[in-house]
Amino acid sequence: MRQLTVLGGCGAYPEPGRACSGFLLEWDGFRLVLDLGYATLPRLLTHCPDAAVDAVVITHEHPDHCIDLHGLFRIHLYGPARGRRIPLYCTPGVPSRLAALEPDVDLDAVFDIHQLPGSYQVGPFTLTGVLLPHYVPDAGIRLETDGFALAYTGDTGPHQRLAQLGRDVDLFIVEATDRAGETRQSQRNLLTSSEAGRWAARAGARRLMLTHFWPGNDRRTAVESARAGFDAEVLTAEEDLVIPLDAT
């Protein structure tokens, strides 16, 4: 089985019935999680009841991308799967946030921590982390295997490295926050949906998925804005959406 399951696509905080940033990537039995924001863990457990994931990748330390990592930690610390360490690839602020929640427990009891940005072999995937502009260090993620490539921005402002990150990928998951007033900021830390479309086109991506929607935003409007600059398929990160992934 080769597929991507959306665990959540909200930014900042979850709307009713929704969850923040999170994805489950399954490839021939290998399970990799990309971000675990608010309310993503219960959805992950519906797909992996034993929480038996093979690797976790966290783009940055903001809670809407990493807070449910704490729940996963506790499952593996106290549950039936205890003693099995999980590779965790993340920016330096992530372990610090998690350690603040569990000051009396060594994170190494559950996680084998590897710092992003950087390059690693993660199961069947070659993982490349690319530093992107945000309020805190954010690592855009590129995963490649068997003629297939997927990229995920985490949270980012406009930057030339986005084209490098998403170059010719089969699926480019790009944040499209559309936060009011963002484009008037002197230091850009988030994207609009129209910018997401233009960067996906510039990268030559085959498909685009918009994510990290600001609460209250109309996702259909975001898709229309992205399509103005990107003429291939545009998806939105809807909870429990399953996308088959085939090598090309």
Image: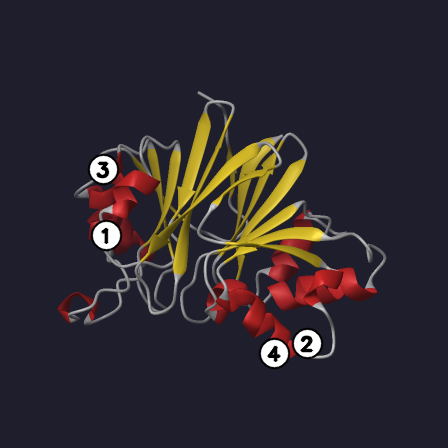
**Residue assigned mark 3:** 201
**Residue assigned mark 2:** 102
Residue 141 screen position, x and y as percent = 43, 46
Residue 59 screen position, x and y as percent = 46, 57
How far apart are the alpha carbons under marks 3 and 4?
Answer: 40 Å
Classed neighbour count for the residue bearing mark 2: other residues with Cα under 10 Å, few (<14), some (14–19), many (≥20): some
The amino acid type of the residue labelled 3 equals: Ala
Q: Could you say whether the residue bearing mark 3 is in a helix, strand or loop?
A: helix
Mark toward the viewer: 3 or 4 = 4
Q: As drawn, is 80 to the left or to the right of 94?
A: right
**Residue assigned mark 4:** 100
Q: Could you say whether the residue bearing mark 1 is in a helix, strand or loop?
A: loop
Snapshot quadrant of residue 232: top left
In primary-sequence order, the first of circles 4 and 1 is 4
How far apart are the alpha carbons under marks 1 and 2?
Answer: 35 Å
Residue 96 screen position, x and y as percent = 56, 72
Q: As drawn, is 159 to the left or to the right of 108?
A: left
In primary-sequence order, the first of circles 3 and 4 is 4
Mark toward the viewer: 2 or 3 = 2
Q: As drawn, is 116 to the left or to the right of 135?
A: right
Classed neighbour count for the residue bearing mark 3: other residues with Cα under 10 Å, few (<14), some (14–19), many (≥20): many
